[in-house]
Image (cartoon, rainbow, N blue to C red):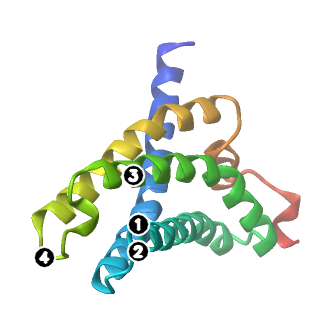
Amino acid sequence: MEHAARGSLNRLAFTATAHCLAGCSIGEVLGAVIGTAAALPVGTTIVLATALAFLFGYLLTMLPLLRSGVALGTALRLAFASDTISILIMEIVDNTLMVLIPGAMNAGLSEFLFWASLLGSLLIAGVVAFPVVRWLISRGRGHAVVHQYHAGSSHSDHAQ
């Protein structure tokens, strides 16, 4: 692969990973804060945070598509196709690390351990997801599918 193309692929993969991580992080942080504030059991907090991570991850992908005229059903299918694997990887890594860091899941919202563990685990999750996102894009899958819509390609299913 040519150096410029590899650089372009890396930039696209980084942007896609960061975008996915943003949505995942919004949901993960919100779920962790709600679970911690409500003193929910660890398992319940993880399920809540994971569900919200998927929700916000998909929403961040769908909103620009919907604004550009893509039909809701198409936007939903594109979000599932482009984000599911990367969000799944990030959630597995993030939640595994949060459970493995001693005291992280029981730390209070005002404790440094809570926020440092959450931030660190999310950043590591993004690093772990990056090569998978890059590999998928290089094969025309994952975020490459959504990128085609952002790149201004004409699609007949915008009005479905």
Q: Which of the 4 image quarters holds residue 106?
A: bottom left
Which residue bears the numbered disc 1? 28
Label 4 sits on a secondary structure element that is loop
**Marks 2,1: beta carbons within 8 A:** yes
Report the amino acid beneath label 3. Answer: Asp
**Marks 1,3: beta carbons within 8 A:** yes
The first of marks 2 and 3 along the sequence is 2
Residue 151 x, y percent position in the rendering: 63, 49
Residue 44 x, y percent position in the rendering: 46, 73
Report the amino acid beneath label 2. Answer: Gly
Which residue bears the numbered disc 4? 110
Q: Residue 31 carries which label?
A: 2
| Residue at x 63% of width, y 74% of height | 67
CA–CA distance in space, label 4 to label 3: 20 Å
**Marks 4,3: beta carbons within 8 A:** no
Residue 135 relative to residue 42: left or right: right
Label 2 sits on a secondary structure element that is helix
CA–CA distance in space, label 2 to label 3: 13 Å
| Residue at x 56% of width, y 51% of height | 88
Which residue bears the numbered disc 3? 94
